[in-house]
Image (cartoon, rainbow, N blue to C red):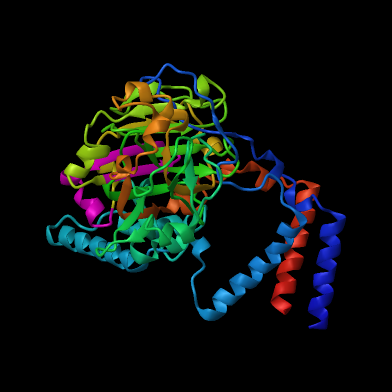
Amino acid sequence: MHRATCIFTTLILFLTTFPNAATAHSNEIPNARRHSTPQSQSSKKVLPRRGNPLGAPEALSSSSRLSQLAESLRKRALKKEGKRDPKLGPGAGPDGVIAAENRRRRRAAREAAGAGASPAEHALEKRQQSSSGSATATSSAPVASASTNSTGNSTEPTWILNDVYAGNTFWNYFSFFTGADPTNGPTDYVNASIAFSEGLAYNNAQKQVIMKADNTTSLQLGEFRKSPRIQSYKTYTGGLFVLDVEKTPYGCGVWPAFWTVGSNWPSNGEIDVYEGVHLSTNNQVTWHTTPGCTLKPGGFFGRINSTDCNTAVNSNAGCAVTDQSYSSSGATLQAIGGGVYAMQWDDTGISVWFFPRPTVPNDVTDLDPDPTTWGEPMAHLSPDDCDVVSHFADHVIVFNIAFCGDWAGATYLTSGCPGTCNAQIMDPSNFDESYWIINSLRVYTNAYLQAGELSAALPMRGRPSILGSMAGLGVAAMALASSWL
């Protein structure tokens, strides 16, 4: 204990002497915030979102740096109790076994038909024997593989289930955002305690995930309405994200979204996989980045709203594509039993599909997705005109329900809704349909991503500064201290 105390004292002196060492790059967090303003729906100028997108502090205080030691002790306690760290994601769990069994059955069927085994079954072994080395799976997922062509060369990856967000454990892997609405709307984002106690976040009898806006409280003009916004503890750089929903929120002044975003916004980018507004029945996909990323027409069938993804131009409209399917959002989506949104993010670009419930592919249902068989995506950001590797990295997953603000407020006059947006917020009955019903969110990985295919998105990690190196020594000291305590 005496030796541990000495190390802890040394750590305090280190942090006091070099107060900025651990925050050498944290000052890059912006004061400006995103969001999409569909050019086709409004000609109004819309201000960008303000504030850090994740609600993180702009500089790490000394007390916060010391809290890293507490974090080390927390992890040690979890390990001792045999519990999984929520920051690692939920893992594939039983679904990973189901997916593997589906692949075995398909292989057996092919062999019984005389077709032989798929090249995908053997690709990982080939890749592990190659000069590039082997890849190890993250979380609790199995190691992924890549399919091969007739010459034995690696081609398309096999997607392996990595994380499952569903059921009663869904909430274990998300935190509740409680900051001011970055989109400048009258939204009161509540903490977990309020969300659960007031029925704004829960699981129904079927274990579906429900997130809803407050629809019981009458407000005075100017008051804010309670709503949940959650973000994953785990971060992702690439993957195949498959969201199965039965219902998305809708209503006058309502602005729901399912999206991913990096901490250093806009440098690490933002991907809006699903965004609805008011009573619209069309989903909009939008990308927000730093300069140098544009949407290349072609290769997808959605309607282009804007092509410059740069947050500094066009009032932060981003590059946006609208789904022309009238069942991709709102009431019509609910009427058909929902559907599946899928986003593939790798070095081939970022693609988004939507499948209404009756058309969900069998491979998605079987937990063995193969995007190469899904046809043309609804939206696609090509690497030809946007370096995906340098513009997108380290994203958390976000679900939220916002009100009015930069988009819903700006488009309210053309929405067909009565009165004004702020006046509509006062009536609780306006929000009776403002809730999510989520069946599951599954995240898949592949051998290429596991091998660090998109790792070039974080060049600073390969070129640490002197202060950054000193911060690393401080972290190492904390780890040693925690192991001795």
The residue shown at (87%, 56%) is: 17
Residue 344: within the magenta? yes
Indicate the position of residue 363 as horizontal and vertical percent values. 23, 52
The magenta segment is 340-368
Q: Which residue is at a point 79% across and 49% down the rendered structure image?
A: 20
Q: Compare residues 319 and 424 and report the one nearer the observer.
A: 424
In the depicted view, which residue is nearer to us: 7 or 316? 316
Which quadrant holds the C terminus?
A: bottom right
Give the quarter of the figure containing the N terminus. bottom right
- In the displayed structure image, the side of residue 138 where residue 124 appears, left or right: left
Q: Residue at x 20, y 59 (%)?
A: 106
* Residue 357 falls inside the magenta stretch: yes
**Outermost bottom residue:** 1
Count up the numbered dots.
0
**Quadrant of res 248:** top left
Is 395 drawn above or below residue 473 in the view shown? above
Would residue 56 be visible to someone looking at this image? Answer: yes
Residue 227 vs 94, above or below: the answer is: above
**327 left or right, relative to 35:** left
Q: Residue furthest top?
A: 43
Q: Nearer the viewer, residue 186 or 58?
A: 186
212 left or right of 281 in image:
right
Residue 223 rendering spot, x and y as whole percentages: 48, 40
Residue 115, x across and y down, in percent? 17, 55
